[in-house]
Each structure stands twice: as structure tokens, then as C-alpha cells.
């Protein structure tokens, strides 16, 4: 019998389970029963679609055996089972990166960390909160040899061939001395009803009970073996909504999501007509930890006529709804539908379209704290949807929210237009990486003076790609304030007169800065800053910047326009300055400080620092 070392991350996980996570030990039953249900689902599918696996009279079941004398609890199933390689891959090593992500996301808070167990697909290891030794005996369907995986959770495991009549898996758990509460029939039954009542297969509890018969001298007490089903074994989503309570939905959610929190909301729908299907979807209160990982685990399971088909198909919902958990059960899809056919299937496309609309409607209905929590957790992926889902773009625009230059918290586009100028019908925004920098941008000065709201978009990586392609919302055009004229009370004649007056100065600054700027001109947008920089909206490359961002490429550098404030004392003094060297330093400082105000970097940081030091020395 060969001994093997657990992979490093598994070793860390086992140590965590045995020494740290004591807040919610009972979840080990939930996790193992859930794994057993998945194994039954997989075999059931094979039995219905593959002649090799058809078995007369097979029906899936999960058994739990309590043995007080031995101090052990056993959980078994007659599902698909595992061979030697499966045992080593699934229990001894990391089959996917979820376990690494689990370790990376640990907080040190035992209760919070225990809630991550199932979310990352590492639920089997929760057994080590209560076990001093575990044996997993398994036989894979279609194979002759069975194997046993054994470990005490201290860093090593061993696998050896054994004999087992039926395919499936049995997990023998030798309980720690202080964990014998789980050998009590009522305690285990309570846990199963709490977490696994609506597992679609019967869960049979096997236990012993003392029975007394007769009276007086004839009185006799003996130990009797008993078995009883302790769950309803009905797929919850198939039941009429009128028969279900909120508590039923919440416990089922916790079973399929491995989440300890209640969902923000849920929606249960049955559709009849050309296509018949049932959906049950949940929106988690907290975003899945792997939501921004390329190998995220989809949260929706596909069934056909209550037969499980798949739980890892990322095509069931669009990627931006990857946080949604739940069930799709179709009456019309063929049982043996392949993954390739799923991607092209018209029935599934109709189900997907209907599901997306229902989910977005449910999100729109969220209010108060629930709406705020949703925005905090999912605003960024909703922006992804605006970019990718053109059919539901308007609904997504109703949902998305942004920071504002005039309002506290986050605001919707609907709220913005309710306060905006209904004649101009323009939504103003500014994009950057740092909220603080954006709020102090000189480009906002004219808007603040005119009391015009500007949306502060500080998620540049996403906003710079998504926002330019929105175009408009309810006939209100979105305008980037870095590319348009600012609000101004001066007439065109007044502007022209000021430009003429300061033309010698703007020409001279342009001469100093050369190709570093496209143009130097007098600004009507500044009130307190001496200068600002902005993009030239007419430059062909400016229009292509978003396209380059979409392709993940660095956009070509676009020469900026430098605007100077003729009312600022610094500009007035510069206009009269005769020292050519000092004038040049001041011109460069006007440009570089304006860049810094917009979160950009001076082209030559060393030269900028030197000029500032030189001027500061002269000022002292």
C-alpha cells in the first residue's frame, strides 16, 4: 500500500480544518451529501443515455449509517464512483485552482472562512473538523476494481485496491471523541432536514435503537436496527410556488451554493408553450470569490426532465451573469444532448433569452439596502453586460450606477437625467483611475460653477471601453468632458476678443512646448486653476482610443491641447515676463502640472522637479 503526500495547498487546508474552523462543524454532512447527490446525478445521466450503463431497477439513494459502538458515521451512495486516479486527483491534489483561491481568500475569521469551504469546491475536507480518520471506498461505474483512499488528515494518504460489490462511494468517518453528537439520530436528522431536505434522492438514515417488549419478568430490551428516509427527496423547483415557503427556497439555495448567507433575491418560473421549462435562480448577497477568474465555476445546473445534465457549462447564461446560482430544467431538450449541441441549440437559446430578462427584471426590482448591496458587489459585471449584451443594453443601463460630482453615494442614469437640463439632454462624465484626482480635476471647475452634475468614472480599465460605446440613454447623449467645450457664460465675440488679446502669449508658449502639445489656447472652463489639458475630439486617433483598449492594446499617444486661464494671476504675470529662460520653465510647469491634475505623468519627471526647485528657490 503506497503512501502519498498531499499537495501543499491540500496540506494547508487540512491543517486549517483540524485546528481552526470550529464555528459550524455540522456542514460536513451537507458537503458530503451534496457530493453524493452529484455522483448520483452523473450516473443517472449515463444510465439513461449510454447502453453500457443501463441497469434494471437502479434507483439512486444516499445512506447514512450511525454506529455508536464503533464511534463512526458512514455516508454512502450508488452513484458514478471513482477509480484510483480519480481518488488521487480529487482528494489528494488540486483538481482545479479553486483550492488555491480558497487559501488566498482566507480572512483569519473562522466563521467567515468556514463559509468559503463549499464555495471553492473543497467541501470534502470539511470532514476533518470532526474526523480523526477517514476511509473513502469507491468503485467507478463500468470498472471491476474498487479502491480505498485512507488518511488521518496529517499530511499523508494511501490508496489500495479493495473489494466492493456495487459502484458508488462510501465514506467511513471515525469521529473524534468530542464529536460524538453526530451519532445521535435526532442531531443528524436535524442537519439533513436543515441543509439537504430537497436533495432529489432519498437519504436513508440507518441507526440502532433499543426496544423493550413484555412486562415484569417477561420484560426484554434488545437493540434493533432501523432505517428511515429523512428527506423529502423531491426536486424543489418542480413543486408549485404555492406549496413553498421562503425558508424552503433559502435552504435549497444554501444546499446548491454552499453559502451560509441568505440570497439577495430569488425567482422561480415555469414556462409553458412552444418550449416548456422551469427555472429557479438566486442572486447571492456576496459575489463569488472566483467571479473575476478566467476559470470561474458557473453557478447554474442544467437538467432535462429532472435528469442532471451539466453544472459546468458557461453558455447557460451570459458571462456577465456568472454570479447567478440556480437551476434550469427543460422538458424539450434531448437527454443525450452534447456540449457542442448545447451551444447551438435553439431551445436553449430561447431559455437563455427568457432567463436573462427575468433575472434583470428581478435586479431592477431590488430596493433599499438590497439594491445598494447589489451595486457594491456586481456593478462592474453589469458594465460588462452593457458592452456585450446589446439586446438587454437599455435594461442594464437602468441598473448600472456611477459616482457623481454633486451627489453622495452612487447614482443611476435615470436619477441623473431627472436633475439634468431637459433641453440639452446631455449626460456629462469624466474617466480616470483615481476618484480623488478626478474630483479635483481643473476640467470640472466650469461644471461646478454652473452647478452641472458630472459622473465620476474611476474604473478606467472598464469605463474607458464601455462608456464610449453607450452613445445615449433615453435620448440623452453621453459626453466626455475632456473632449467637449465646457459650459460658459461668455459670448462668441467675447471669447474671440480674449483669444486675440492673448494670442502672442499662446503662440509663445506653443513655440516653447513644440510638438509636446497640439495647440495652446485661452480657456473659458477654468475658474481657479492656471491651466488644464484635454484631448482633441476631432483627432482621428482619439476616436480609436476605445478600440485599442477593447483589443487590450496601448492606444497611440495623442497630442494634448493646453488651455490657460487668462484670469489667473500666474498667467497675467507670465504675459508680462521678459526673462526667456524663466518663461520657458513656467510654460513647461503649466503643462506638466496640468497633466498631473488629470492623473497623467510629465514626460520628463526629472526636468519637472528641477524647474519646480528653481522657481521655488527664486520665490524664497
Image (cartoon, rainbow, N blue to C red):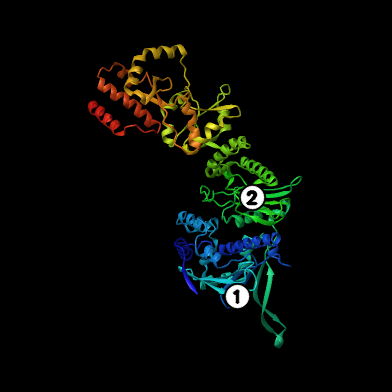
Who comes first in sequence, dot 2 or dot 1? 1
Name the one closer to the observer, 465 or 359. 465
Q: Residue 401: in sight, yes or no? A: yes
Position of 355 relative to 596 (above/below): below
User: As rendered, which of 422 and 510 lies closer to the eye?
Assistant: 510
Structural crowding at the residue carrying mark 1, measured as other residues with C-alpha within 10 Å and reported as few (<14), some (14–19) or many (≥20): few
For the C terminus, the image quarter is: top left
Tally of marks: 2
Give how far across and how far down residue 43 sits, in percent.
Answer: 66, 62
Select label 2 or label 1 by which is in front: 2
Q: Is residue 405 something that shows in the picture?
A: no
Residue 618, above or below 495: below
* Camera-side residue of 449 and 52: 52
| Residue 586 horizontal/vertical position (percent) | 30, 24
Query: Of helix, strand and loop, which one carries label 2?
Result: helix
Dots 2, 1 in contact, CB < 8 A: no
Taking the image as shown, residue 21 lies to the left or right of residue 498, namely right
Q: Who's the residue at 37% across and 32% down the image? A: 596
Q: Is residue 276 above or below residue 408?
A: below
The residue that disc 2 covers is 340
Residue 340 position, x and y percent, is 64, 50
Nearest to the observer: residue 521 or residue 310: 310
Q: CA distance from mark 2 to mark 1?
A: 38 Å
Find residue 163 and name its label. 1
Q: Secondary structure at mark 1?
A: loop
Q: Residue at x 25, y 22 (%)?
A: 581
Amino acid at each position: 500500500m503506497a503512501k502519498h503526500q498531499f499537495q501543499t495547498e491540500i496540506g494547508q487546508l487540512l491543517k486549517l480544518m483540524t485546528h481552526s474552523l470550529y464555528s459550524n462543524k455540522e456542514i460536513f454532512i451537507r458537503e458530503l451529501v451534496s457530493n453524493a447527490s452529484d455522483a448520483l446525478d452523473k450516473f443517472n445521466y449515463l444510465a439513461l443515455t449510454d447502453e453500457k450503463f443501463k441497469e434494471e431497477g437502479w434507483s439512486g439513494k444516499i445512506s447514512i449509517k450511525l454506529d455508536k459502538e464503533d464511534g463512526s458515521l458512514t455516508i454512502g451512495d450508488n452513484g458514478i464512483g471513482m477509480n484510483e486516479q480519480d481518488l488521487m486527483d480529487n482528494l489528494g491534489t488540486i483538481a482545479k485552482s479553486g483550492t488555491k483561491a480558497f487559501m488566498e481568500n482566507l480572512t483569519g475569521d473562522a466563521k467567515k472562512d468556514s463559509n468559503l469551504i463549499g464555495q471553492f469546491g473543497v467541501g470534502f475536507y470539511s470532514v476533518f473538523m470532526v474526523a480523526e480518520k477517514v476511509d473513502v471506498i469507491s468503485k467507478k461505474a463500468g470498472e471491476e476494481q474498487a479502491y480505498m483512499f485512507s488518511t488521518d488528515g496529517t499530511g499523508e494518504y494511501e490508496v489500495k485496491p479493495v473489494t466492493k460489490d456495487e459502484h458508488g462511494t462510501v465514506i467511513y468517518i471515525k469521529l473524534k471523541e468530542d464529536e460524538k453528537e453526530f451519532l445521535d439520530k435526532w442531531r443528524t436528522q436535524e442537519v439533513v432536514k436543515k441543509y439537504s431536505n430537497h436533495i432529489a434522492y432519498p437519504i436513508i438514515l440507518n441507526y440502532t435503537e433499543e426496544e423493550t417488549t413484555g412486562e415484569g419478568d417477561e420484560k426484554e430490551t434488545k437493540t434493533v436496527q432501523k432505517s428511515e428516509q429523512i428527506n423529502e427527496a423531491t426536486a424543489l423547483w418542480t413543486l408549485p410556488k404555492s406549496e413553498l415557503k421562503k425558508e424552503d427556497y433559502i435552504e435549497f439555495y444554501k444546499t446548491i451554493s454552499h453559502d451560509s448567507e441568505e440570497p439577495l433575491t430569488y425567482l422561480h418560473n415555469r414556462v409553458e408553450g412552444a418550449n416548456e421549462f422551469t427555472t429557479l435562480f438566486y442572486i447571492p448577497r456576496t459575489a463569488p470569490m472566483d467571479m473575476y477568474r478566467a476559470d470561474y465555476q458557473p453557478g447554474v445546473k442544467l437538467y432535462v426532465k429532472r435528469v442532471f445534465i451539466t453544472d459546468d457549462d458557461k453558455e447557460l447564461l451570459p458571462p456577465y451573469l456568472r454570479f447567478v446560482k440556480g437551476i434550469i430544467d427543460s422538458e424539450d431538450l434531448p437527454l443525450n444532448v452534447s456540449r457542442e449541441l448545447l451551444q447551438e441549440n435553439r431551445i436553449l437559446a430561447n431559455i437563455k433569452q427568457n432567463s436573462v430578462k427575468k433575472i434583470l427584471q428581478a435586479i431592477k426590482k431590488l430596493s433599499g439596502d438590497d439594491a445598494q448591496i447589489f451595486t457594491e458587489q456586481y456593478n462592474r459585471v453589469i458594465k460588462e453586460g452593457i458592452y456585450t449584451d446589446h439586446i438587454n443594453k437599455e435594461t442594464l443601463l437602468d441598473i448600472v450606477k456611477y459616482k457623481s460630482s454633486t451627489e453622495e453615494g452612487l447614482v443611476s442614469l435615470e436619477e441623473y437625467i431627472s436633475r439634468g437640463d431637459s433641453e440639452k439632454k446631455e449626460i456629462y462624465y469624466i474617466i480616470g483611475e483615481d476618484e480623488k484626482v478626478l474630483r479635483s480635476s481643473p476640467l470640472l471647475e466650469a461644471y461646478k460653477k454652473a452647478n452641472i452634475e458630472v459622473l465620476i468614472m474611476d474604473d478606467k480599465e472598464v469605463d474607458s471601453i464601455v462608456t464610449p460605446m453607450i452613445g445615449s440613454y433615453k435620448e440623452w447623449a453621453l459626453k466626455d468632458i475632456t473632449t467637449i467645450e465646457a459650459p460658459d457664460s461668455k459670448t462668441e465675440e467675447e471669447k474671440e476678443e480674449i483669444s486675440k488679446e492673448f494670442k502672442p502669449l499662446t503662440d509663445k508658449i506653443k513655440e516653447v512646448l513644440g510638438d509636446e502639445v497640439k495647440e495652446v489656447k485661452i480657456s473659458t472652463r477654468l475658474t481657479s486653476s492656471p491651466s488644464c489639458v484635454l484631448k482633441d475630439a476631432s483627432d482621428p486617433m482619439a476616436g480609436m482610443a476605445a478600440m485599442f483598449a477593447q483589443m487590450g492594446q496601448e492606444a497611440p499617444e495623442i497630442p494634448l491641447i493646453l488651455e490657460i486661464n487668462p484670469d489667473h494671476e500666474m498667467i497675467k504675470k507670465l504675459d508680462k515676463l521678459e526673462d526667456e529662460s524663466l518663461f520657458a520653465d513656467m510654460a513647461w510647469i503649466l503643462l506638466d502640472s496640468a497633466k498631473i491634475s488629470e492623473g497623467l505623468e510629465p514626460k520628463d519627471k526629472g526636468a519637472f522637479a528641477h524647474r519646480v526647485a528653481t522657481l521655488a528657490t527664486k520665490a524664497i
